[in-house]
């Protein structure tokens, strides 16, 4: 009887293990299919001209996406300039002074904001930035993306600062260090490597957004560095070129997709390198 | 000898639980005062009230007076930050700053208080590490992470970090309770050496340690100071029955 129970348990164990592996495999296979497809389709479009030239009309060969690469960096840069300070500081507030009603409301709103579809933040930026300025602009795009970034950075910073043990805070306080220095120069420093990782992941996440940029940053066929003018971005370019009827534009879209994934991958790797830096928690 | 700290009617609470009840005692300059008693008797809370670190805990309260050279550290014109600069503290568990090197750990207090001159910092670090009897072990790896040191070395590093600020009083909250006997012996030797310059208050649950290192001993029970006297008198001739029961090992 006992051996039968044992046999049954072993069979169930094997079956469950099989299903776990199979599920994991399905996820990984899909990821690799996407990556493989993009690499195969995209890698042929990538060359020096692709990186440094401007787009050409359909049918004219040799166009590049330099304006979209620069544009993406500008828009994501604006978003980071707004979202990193706001997000990190709210995260510190929530973790160090967050034992009150106001903080729990903020925490709740940050979670709700995290779940809002990105296209909705685009509409909000359209209403509050594009309409008053009477034009699409890089600034509007950056603001739309920053709305997406702030709650991510806020909540990660909060979690990571909270993980710093109280003994570290007390050690610094006992040295006669004022509280603001304890927080900024000791606590934040202790958590800094992981906070940087969190920020990088947030940057990579919004770098791939298209919907909020469609009616904020809009599009531009020319190189533009002006923050109050429409600007081209890689994601919007993929959207436009992939849905166009011209085969050479389609292949540029694949190339751009490949480049975008490459950049996101690099950002992820850099953030991992920060995590493995010595002295991290 | 001069009275460095005079504690008058000190009470402390966590929320509405009273942890200390009407404590009165004097601490002599350049002496070692041990605070003994069973777990939960308030000895840690007591030393945490002496550098105003008790109050940083949520819902913690203090009443009474702690006179440092005659001036109440709880009076409204006393800045707790300045109090803590004059009264340093070493904690039960070694707590070096994990993202800083050994050098940075010792220099942290000075640096965060605004000392920028590189050579002065280096001098202070060397002097403090020597005083904490750690210099010879770490002088070749000052820029390595403090977390790479053993527990006993980390605790001596924390003592060096406290000494670097040259406080007048050093509070030690069971500084050797997490350490092995050899590291404990190191720390006790160290206490003997630094008491010439500093006034030391040490919490311990180890009565032999209190007997070995201290000049005065206070016995705490359930938040009250039962007896306070010269260490030799406490251990050879306790006045209170409860003190006698505790030091002879009948409870605790």
Image: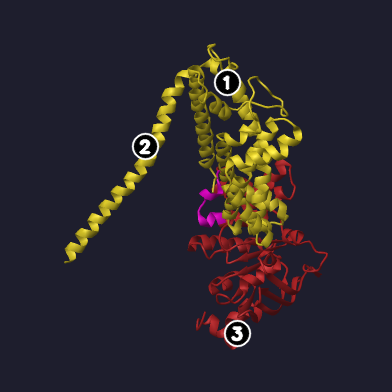
**Residue wearing tag 1:** A65
Q: Is residue B150 magenta?
A: yes
Point out which mark residue A77 bears. none
Residue in view at x 63 percent, y 79 percent: B223
Depth check, mark 2 against mark 3: the one in front is: 2
Q: Residues within 10 Å of mark 3 (few under 14, many from 20)?
A: few
Q: Quick one: label 2 or label 1, which is nearer the N terminus?
A: 2
**Residue wearing tag 3:** B237
Instruction: Name chain A's colour.
Output: yellow
Residue A139 or B96: which is nearer the viewer?
Answer: A139
Q: Residues within 10 Å of mark 1 (few under 14, many from 20)?
A: many
Q: Is residue B167 above or below residue B206?
A: above
User: The numbered mark 2 sits on a residue in which chain?
Assistant: A
**Residue wearing tag 2:** A29
Q: Are marks 1 and 3 on the same chain?
A: no
Main secondary structure found in the magenta portion: helix
Residue in view at x 63 percent, y 48 percent: A188
Q: Is residue A149 above or below residue B62?
A: above
């Amino acid at each position: 009887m006992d051996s039968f129970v044992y046999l049954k348990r072993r069979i169930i164990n094997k079956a469950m293990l099989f299903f776990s592996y199979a599920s994991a495999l399905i996820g990984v296979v899909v990821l690799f299919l996407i990556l493989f497809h993009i690499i195969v389709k995209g890698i042929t479009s990538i060359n020096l001209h692709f990186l440094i030239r401007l787009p050409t009309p359909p049918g004219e060969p040799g166009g590049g996406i330099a304006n979209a690469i620069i544009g993406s960096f500008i828009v994501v840069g604006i978003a980071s300039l707004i979202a990193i300070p706001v997000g990190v500081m709210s995260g510190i507030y929530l973790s160090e002074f967050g034992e009150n009603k106001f903080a729990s409301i903020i925490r709740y709103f940050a979670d709700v904001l995290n779940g809002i579809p990105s296209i909705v933040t685009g509409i909000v930026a359209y209403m509050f930035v594009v309409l008053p300025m009477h034009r699409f602009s890089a600034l509007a795009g950056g603001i739309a993306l920053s709305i997406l970034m702030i709650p991510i950075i806020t909540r990660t910073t909060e979690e990571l600062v909270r993980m710093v043990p109280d003994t570290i805070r007390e050690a610094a306080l006992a040295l006669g260090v004022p509280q603001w220095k304890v927080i900024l120069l000791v606590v934040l420093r202790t958590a800094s490597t992981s906070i940087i990782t969190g920020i990088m992941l947030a940057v990579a996440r919004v770098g791939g957004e298209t919907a909020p940029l469609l009616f904020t940053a809009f599009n531009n066929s020319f190189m533009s560095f002006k923050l109050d003018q429409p600007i081209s971005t890689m994601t919007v370019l993929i959207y436009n070129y992939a849905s166009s009827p011209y085969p050479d534009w389609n292949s540029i879209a694949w190339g751009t997709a490949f480049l975008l994934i490459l950049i996101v991958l690099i950002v992820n790797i850099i953030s991992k390198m920060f995590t493995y830096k010595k002295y991290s928690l | 000898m001069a009275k460095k700290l005079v504690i008058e009617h000190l009470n402390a609470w966590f929320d509405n639980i009273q942890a200390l009840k009407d404590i009165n005692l004097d601490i002599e300059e350049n002496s070692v005062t041990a605070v003994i008693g069973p777990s939960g008797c308030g000895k840690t809370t007591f030393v945490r009230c002496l550098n105003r670190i008790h109050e940083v805990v949520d819902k913690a309260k203090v009443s009474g007076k702690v006179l440092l050279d005659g001036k109440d550290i709880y009076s409204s014109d006393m800045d707790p930050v300045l109090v803590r600069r004059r009264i340093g503290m070493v904690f039960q568990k070694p707590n070096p700053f994990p993202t800083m090197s050994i050098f940075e750990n010792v220099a942290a207090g000075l640096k965060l208080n605004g000392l920028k001159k590189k050579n002065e910092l280096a001098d202070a670090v060397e002097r403090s590490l020597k005083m904490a009897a750690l210099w010879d072990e770490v002088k070749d790896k000052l820029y390595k992470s403090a977390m790479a040191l053993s527990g006993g070395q980390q605790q001596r590093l924390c003592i060096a970090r406290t000494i670097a600020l040259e406080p007048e009083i050093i509070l030690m909250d069971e500084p050797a309770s997490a350490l092995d006997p050899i590291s404990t012996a190191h720390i006790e030797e160290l206490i003997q050496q630094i008491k010439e310059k500093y006034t030391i208050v040490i919490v311990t649950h180890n009565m032999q340690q209190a007997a070995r290192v201290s000049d005065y001993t206070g016995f705490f029970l359930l938040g009250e100071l039962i007896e306070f006297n010269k260490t030799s008198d406490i251990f050879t001739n306790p006045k209170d029955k409860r003190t006698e029961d505790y030091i002879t090992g009948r409870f605790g």
